[in-house]
Image (cartoon, grey):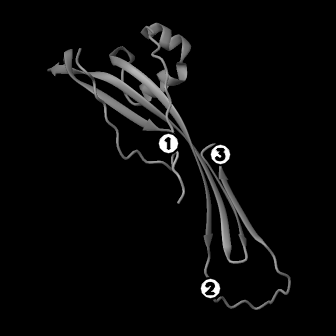
């Protein structure tokens, strides 16, 4: 039985003012703006980058296919596919078995912001605290996100 390894990361909190964030992390500020969130409503922003690497070995089954030409040379079939920087797949078919390698990379952005109360066209106070989560890899889907804030 194969043993699973779990991945974890730990970082210290970095406190910045809105101006310092705009000055030092313009790409992240642009991501926030692209989601339609005003920087002044931010509570916190975090990014996580992950990479998946899977090596697969499995058996393949024979299929009957009619081909007009017959090759007498036994060849190894290999394939590869890349979509930089998100995915890289390569493999070899050898003696009825397939060896496959899959590498994917993803960056996840998490934004926590205030949702203001509205009255007519006035915005004031805080109606709710909301978390937005965005995956940069077009092949990945976010299945679950949870934001828990502890009271002091």
Residue 130 coordinates in the image, percent (x, y) = 28, 28
Mark 3 neighbour density, 10 Å: few (under 14) some (14–19) many (20 or more): few
Residue 2 coordinates in the image, percent (x, y) = 54, 57
* Residue at the limit of the structure toward the front, as seen here: 1
User: Regarding mark 2 in the picture, which secondary structure is present there?
Assistant: loop
Name the residue beneath numbered marker 3. 84
Question: Which residue is painted at 52% across and 43% down in the image?
Answer: 137
Q: Nearer the viewer, mark 2 or mark 3?
A: 2
CA distance separating discs 1 and 3 = 25 Å
Question: Which residue is painted at 45% across and 31% down in the image?
Answer: 109
Which mark sits nearer the N-terminus, 2 or 3?
2
Residue 32 coordinates in the image, percent (x, y) = 43, 25
Q: How many marks?
A: 3
Q: Out of 150 and 81, give the one closest to the viewer.
A: 150
Q: Quadrant of residue 17?
A: top left
Q: Is residue 35 above or below residue 116?
A: below
Name the residue beneath numbered marker 2. 63
Which image quarter is the C terminus in?
A: top left
* Residue at the limit of the structure toward the right, as seen here: 73
Which mark sits nearer the N-terminus, 2 or 1?
1
Which mark sits nearer the N-terminus, 1 or 3?
1
Q: Out of 106 and 53, give the one closest to the viewer.
A: 53
* Residue at the limit of the structure toward the left, as seen here: 119
Name the residue beneath numbered marker 1. 6
Image disc number at residue 71: none
CA distance separating discs 2 and 3 = 33 Å
Question: Which residue is painted at 39% across and 17% down in the image?
Answer: 39
Mark 2 neighbour density, 10 Å: few (under 14) some (14–19) many (20 or more): few
Q: Is residue 60 above or below residue 92?
A: below
Q: Out of 30 and 75, give the one closest to the viewer.
A: 75
Q: Is residue 149 left or right of residue 23?
A: left
Residues tagged 2 and 3 counted as in contact (Cβ below 8 A): no
């Amino acid at each position: 039985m194969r043993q699973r390894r779990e991945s974890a990361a730990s970082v210290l909190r970095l406190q910045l003012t809105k101006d310092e964030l705009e000055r030092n992390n313009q790409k992240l500020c642009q991501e926030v703006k692209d989601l339609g969130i005003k920087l002044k409503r931010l509570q916190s922003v975090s990014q996580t980058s992950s990479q998946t690497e899977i090596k697969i070995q499995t058996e393949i089954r024979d299929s009957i296919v009619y081909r007009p030409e017959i090759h007498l040379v036994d060849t190894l079939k290999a394939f590869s596919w890349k979509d930089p920087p998100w995915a890289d797949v390569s493999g070899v078919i050898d003696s009825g078995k397939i060896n496959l390698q899959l590498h994917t990379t993803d960056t996840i952005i998490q934004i926590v912001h205030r949702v203001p109360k509205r009255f007519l066209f006035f915005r004031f106070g805080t109606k709710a605290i909301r978390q937005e989560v965005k995956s940069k890899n077009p092949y990945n889907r976010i299945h679950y996100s949870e934001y828990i804030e502890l009271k002091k």
